[in-house]
Amino acid sequence: MHVLVTNDDGIDSPGLWALAGAIRATGAQVSVVAPAEEQSAMSMALPPLTNRELCAIIPPPELDGMLAFAHNGSPVSCVTVAIRSGVLPPIDAVVAGINRGLNSGTNVMLSGTVGAAMIGALWGLPAMAVSLQYRGPEPMPWSTAAYVAQRLFPLLEQIRGHEPLVLNVNVPHLPSPSDIRGFRQTRLSEFFFGHYVDIDLHPPAPVERTQITFRFVRERLPTFAIDTDDGAVLAGYVSITPLRPMIDGSPIRLELPEQV
């Protein structure tokens, strides 16, 4: 099985390489095509049809032999290049992440990580997006999310041949996999970042040119139901939310791992 690993945080993100290593540990062949620079919140943007570059890079020593490329385009462009350019063997699945910060609620519509997985699903491939909760200055526990990705990787076989579907995985910020309370299939919460962002102008009155400061006000966050992605993560569970790029589709019930 040949798996494409990509992200929206860019080729230098430690989450990308943690994910690539976790998927390769399952026995799959893994190749990486990721943005040369951060492309967060690009959703499913595809750049104009202009000349773009694909640059072969050397992966970390522990991933020696893995084909890896940096592409100066969006996450969707990375997946499209990987599938259509011929530089890689045929792709059997797409896994995107590990994103620095959750991709939950209605914000999945903005996520470049989810967008990369979504375009893979539209190509008819099983796809998964993996995101890790962010807690300010605290170190990101990439190994916890990498463990989750490895445990959930077999779910891609469950959805192979299904109508276009993405498994959107969100992982709580926990130092060890043993701290995870379990796995939950969830629905999207009603979280929308726009309700919790304040914009300050400097100077305060609009002028011909003014500086803008965006502030995310965490104190305004509501309480989320446990059956939602945000609610599950805040309660210490891994959230798995099936997402469809198409309006119509039959329900799916995943066979999740029983324990961590």
Image (cartoon, grey):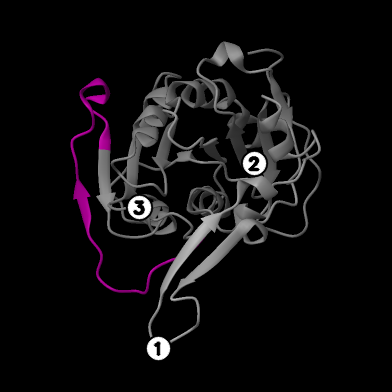
Point 50% across, 20% down: residue: 147
| For residue 143, above or below residue 247 | above
As for residue 56 lying within the magenta part, the answer is yes
As for residue 188 lying within the magenta part, the answer is no
Q: Quadrant of the C terminus?
A: top right
Chief secondary structure of the magenta portion: loop
In the shown orientation, is residue 138 left or right of residue 104? left
Query: Mark 2, residues whose alpha carbon is within 10 Å: few (<14), some, or many (≥20)?
Result: few
The disc labelled 1 sits on which kind of residue?
Answer: Glu
Q: What is the CA distance from the residue labelled 1 to the residue labelled 2?
A: 55 Å
* Mark 1 / mark 3, whichever is N-terminal: 3
* Mark 1 / mark 2, whichever is N-terminal: 2
Range shown magenta: 44-67
Foreground tag (2 vs 3) = 3
For mark 1, what is the residue? 208
Query: Residue 169: horizontal and vertical position, in percent?
Result: 60, 36
What is the count of numbered marks? 3
For mark 3, what is the residue? 38
Q: Secondary structure at mark 3?
A: loop
Q: What is the CA distance from the residue labelled 1 to the residue labelled 3?
A: 30 Å
Point 41% across, 40% down: residue: 4
Q: Quadrant of the N terminus?
A: top left
Location of residue 2 (image quadrant): top left
For mark 2, what is the residue? 161
Labelled pair 1, 2 in contact (Cβ < 8 Å): no
Query: Residue 122: horizontal and vertical position, in percent?
Result: 57, 55
Query: Mark 1, residues whose alpha carbon is within 10 Å: few (<14), some, or many (≥20)?
Result: few
